[in-house]
Image (cartoon, rainbow, N blue to C red):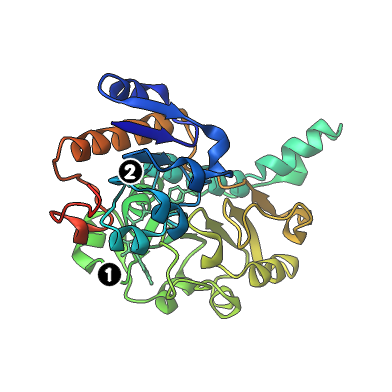
Amino acid sequence: MRVLVTEKLSEQGLELLRRDFQVDVRLELATGALVQEIGPYEALIVRSQTRVTSEVLDAAEHLRVVARAGIGLDNVDVDAATRRGVMVVNAPQSNVISAAEHSLALMLAQARSVPQADAALKAGKWERTAWEGVELAGKTLGIVGVGNVGRRVARFAGAIGMRVLGYDKYVPAEEVRRRGAEPVGSLEELLPQVDVLTCHTPLTPETRHMIDERALSRLRPGAIFINTSRGPVHSERAVFEALVQKRLGAAGLDVFEQEPSPVDNPIFNLDNVVCSGHVAGVTLEANREASLQVTAEILRVLRGERPRDLANPEVWPRPAHRR
Ligand SMILES: NC(=O)c1ccc[n+]([C@@H]2O[C@H](COP(=O)([O-])OP(=O)(O)OC[C@H]3O[C@@H](n4cnc5c(N)ncnc54)[C@H](O)[C@@H]3O)[C@@H](O)[C@H]2O)c1
């Protein structure tokens, strides 16, 4: 059995696979000639850079499973895999703590102007009064999407004394409450009540540009906006305008409408925004966890067991047609 790995994965997981299988780590294939090389492999492990297209799947004569070491499956054509009877698995829990902690880091950074004060000090300005911040304790946080990440943000924010409201279209109010947030019935209702708004939904046709000009105009003046979910969940132009006009007090953005974001993105010139380049889920622990979770899934598949996080359950128990 042969396993192909096209992106950097923590060694702990790979060692488990090497006990029973031939594991080829070919990082150059993440953006290269995967179609030509995939033929002999039964399992493929990717992160977010490798595009597993229908052409790749067509060429993958022996493939039984594609494993995405991480959460999103944006780079894997799951429908094409399903049509070909190839299982797609991921590690949906691997980086939720990391993403939640990063959301909190962006929130705290903006409440206390940490990046701005850091830049000023390093430019030789000792300006204690210029950086009067605000405390988050006692402020109201609005969470949109109280899922795996959102529920942890709710707990963290509660622990620093914030009042936490949550809006989730698909999670019942009682469950939102169990997850640590006071349930709110709609986004419309949530927006005017919050000092900080943070988004934790997947990107779907419904959530695309959910935070647009209209939504931003309903926030309290000077509110802080955080997004570590997916860039197009907010309209970048609308957030830019609201920041320029200081209707939004500040924003913390880990994700962008276009990724990698162009270096001349005008939002980078604003001093009331702190940005990171899609790193919320990137930690030592999350990488290790993703590697361990997907290798465990691959071991299950290659032993004929059902994987736990199967993104296309339609293919189970029907065997892959080329097996
Ligand atoms: N920046 C990063 O590195 C990073 C890391 C981890 C996760 N993420 C992203 O964070 C987001 C949340 O991840 P998760 O693991 O918590 O996902 P999840 O599926 O566990 O939770 C998402 C929640 O959003 C809710 N939701 C869906 N559509 C909605 C809508 N229209 N309105 C309101 N709520 C809606 C769902 O009911 C669910 O409870 C995802 O977009 C994920 O890709 C980013």
SS type, badge 1: loop
Question: Which residue in the structure is indicated by mark 2?
Answer: 91
Kindly identify the residue that appears in the image at 41 percent across and 48 percent down: 157
- In the rendered image, residue 206, in percent from the top left (x then y), is placed at 42, 75
User: CB at mark 1 closer than 8 A to ligand 1?
Assistant: yes
Observer able to see residue 24: yes
Label 2 amino acid?
Ala
Q: Earlier in the sequence, mark 1 or mark 2?
A: 2
What amino acid does circle 1 point to? Tyr
- The quarter holding residue 164 reads bottom left
Q: Which mark is residue 285?
A: none
Q: As rendered, which of 192 and 43 lies closer to the eye?
A: 43
Which percent across, then down, holds residue 136? 50, 49
1 or 2: mark nearer the eye = 2
Evaluate whether residue 162 shows in this view.
Answer: no
What distance separates the C-alpha of mark 1 from that of mark 2?
A: 21 Å
Q: Is residue 23 above or below residue 37?
A: above
How crowded is the residue under tag 1: few (<14 C-alpha within 10 Å), some, or many (20+)? few
Which residue shows up at 53% across the image and 73% down it?
Answer: 209
Residue corresponding to mark 1: 170
Quarter of the view holding residue 265: bottom right
For the residue carrying disc 2, how many other residues have a C-alpha within 10 Å: few (<14), some (14-19), or many (20+)?
many
Which residue is more in the foreground, 216 or 182?
216
Left or right? Give the position of 172 relative to 97.
Answer: left
Looking at the picture, tell me which residue is in the foreground, 174 or 149: 149
Name the quadrant containing residue 216: bottom right
Quarter for ligand 1? Answer: bottom left
Q: Foreground: 214 or 318? A: 318
Q: In the image, is 239 to the left or to the right of 93?
A: right
- Residue at 30% x, 33% y is 295
Q: How many marks?
A: 2
